[in-house]
Amino acid sequence: MGWIPSGGWGEYLLAFATFFVTHSLPIRPPLRPWAVARLGRAGFGLVYSALSLAVMIWLIGSAGRAPFVPLWDWAPWQNHVVLAIMLPVCLMLALAIARPNPFSFGGARNERFDPRQPGVIRYTRHPLLLALALWSAAHILPNGDLAHVILFGVFAGFAFLGGRLVDRRRRREMGQLWHDLRVAMAESPAMSSVTGDTLLRLFVGALLYATLLWLHPLIIGVDPLI
């Protein structure tokens, strides 16, 4: 892969361009129907998620290799803010992944979605995008250099605008059903979403949080507990 510039702004810009290409083109017609027809919905979701994760890891690494342009100093309290926000982020991911969500761009077995037991979707139609926005905004604080501020700022803006764009598309595609499901969710008892599956997912989310704390210094090179 010698054609990829190593370090500097060149790699950073290339990683950014690749991130947006790999996050936009595969979900647009005719590529998405073509890929789903060959991989299946589950296979497409798995490949798309793996590709997105790989490009995101590359992009974050390239930000660390970009020229360091400081904007503000690091302080210990900034890490505490990230630690506090990342726990609900992990819980939200565990509550949202691999469950029906007809309102968003993903979702598994959306035809089985029950508005009487919507889970985390009762509170946000786009839990994955909200988790991305919170993760990004929190990580701006302890990374006060130009490359990382641009990186996490763009991620946060991407998540915020993405929710609006998905809402507009899904509302157009679903028609009256979009409004009917929202009304049914609003009328469902709040505690109806607390099931055995919910408790298991919360446990998995807490485990994910602990795992990320352990892996962070190994993968990113920074210990968030210090």
Image (cartoon, grey):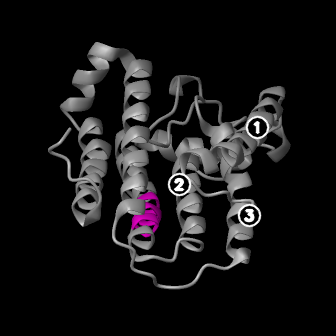
Frontmost residue, 100 versus 148: 148
Question: In this picture, which residue range is highlighted in magenta?
Answer: 151-161
Q: Nearer the viewer, residue 204 or 167?
A: 204
Give amino acid for label 3: Ile
The amino acid on which the numbered mark 1 sits, given as a three-letter code, is: Leu
Q: Please give the residue where the numbered disc 1 appears in the rendered image.
A: 207
Numbered disc in front, either 3 or 1 = 3
**Compared to 1, does 221 lie above or below?**
below
Looking at the rendered structure, the secondary structure element under dot 3 is loop
Residue 139 magenta: no
Spatial separation of the CA atoms under disc 2 and disc 1: 18 Å
Residue type at mark 2: give it: Leu
Image quarter (top left, top right, bottom left or bottom right) of the C terminus:
bottom right
Asked if the residue at tag 3 contacts the one at tag 2, i.e. Cβ–Cβ closer than 8 Å, the answer is no
Check disc 1: other Cα within 10 Å, few if <14, some if 14-19, many if 20+: some
The reply to whether residue 174 is visible in this rendering is no
Helix, strand or loop for disc 2: helix
Residue 168 as seen in the image, left or right of residue 108: left
| Secondary structure predominantly adopted by residues drawn in magenta | helix
Density class for disc 3 (Cα within 10 Å; few <14, some 14-19, many ≥20) is few
Compared to residue 154, the image places residue 111 above or below, namely above
152 magenta-colored: yes
x, y percentage for residue 112? 58, 23
Pointer 3: what residue?
A: 226
Q: Is residue 8 left or right of residue 200?
A: left
Disc 3 from disc 1: Cα separation = 20 Å
Q: Nearer the viewer, mark 2 or mark 1?
A: 1
Judge whether 198 appears above or below 12 on screen.
above
User: Mark 2 — residue?
Assistant: 132
